Image (cartoon, coloured by chain):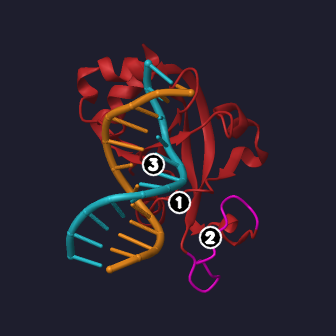
Chain colours: A red, B orange, C cyan
Amino acid sequence: MRHWLMKSEPAEVSIDDLAAAPEKTIPWFGVRNYQARNYMRDDMRVGDLVLFYHSSCAEPGIAGVARVGRLAYPDATQFDRGGKYFDPKATAAAPRWFNVDVTFVRRTRLVALAELRAEPGLASLTVLQRGNRLSITPVAPEEYACIEKLIRA
DNA sequence: GCCAACGTTGGC
DNA sequence: GCCAACGTTGGC
């Protein structure tokens, strides 16, 4: 099983929104970056654990844990003509964008970005690297264990 | 609102 | 294939 960190703007989808969703599950639509897409399409498996990260907000940081609830399938919003995620180059026969479903596991205390940065064990965490903008990044098992510890601290 | 960093696009 | 221009991300 692999571990992931997925960013979401809480104004769009927060950990509370995920907890309140039907079946506590939300399709992770709208990703329009190839590397992030590839992680979902090629590497994510049902049951993989996800650190739910709030970004572009007053208190950026890890706000909860989720898991992959469904393998990647074509992102419906790419076909939504007029929608903000519409992609004119995508076709049903050759979809460009894929998403997994993400299922709520639990809230955590807010582990702030500054706290993550201050933790020596997380020095190579992808999301903390300079200039990183990827909304989906892998988390090594040791890094995940380190963050679990921070969550409980 | 600012701005650094990065990905994508499109002309050549 | 190069690279300038542009758009987006995301912390501050």
SS class, disc 2: loop
Q: Is residue A87 left or right of residue A137?
A: right
- Characterize the magenta stretch by its predominant secondary structure: loop
The chain letter for the residue carrying disc 3 is: A
Q: Report crowding for label 1: few under 14, some 14 to 19, many 20 or more residues within 10 A (C-alpha).
A: some
Nearer-N-terminus badge (1/3): 1
The mark found on residue A136 in the picture is 3
Measured as percent of width and height from the top left, residue A96 is found at 54, 73
**In magenta stretch: residue A75:** no
Residue type at tag 2: Asp
Q: Report crowding for label 2: few under 14, some 14 to 19, many 20 or more residues within 10 A (C-alpha).
A: some
**Alpha carbon of mark 1 to alpha carbon of mark 3: how far?**
11 Å
Magenta span of residues:
A82-95
Measured as percent of width and height from the top left, residue A24 is found at 71, 43
Q: Are marks 2 and 1 in contact (CB under 8 Å)?
A: yes
Q: Are marks 3 and 2 in contact (CB under 8 Å)?
A: no
Residue type at tag 1: Arg
Q: Residue at x 64, y 33 (%)?
A: A10
SS class, disc 3: strand
Q: Is residue A93 above or below residue A129?
A: below
Nearer-N-terminus badge (2/1): 1
The chain letter for the residue carrying disc 1 is: A
Q: Residue at x 47, y 50 (%)?
A: A48
Q: Is residue A95 above or below residue A39?
A: below
Question: Residue under circle 2?
Answer: A87
Q: Quadrant of residue A124?
A: top left
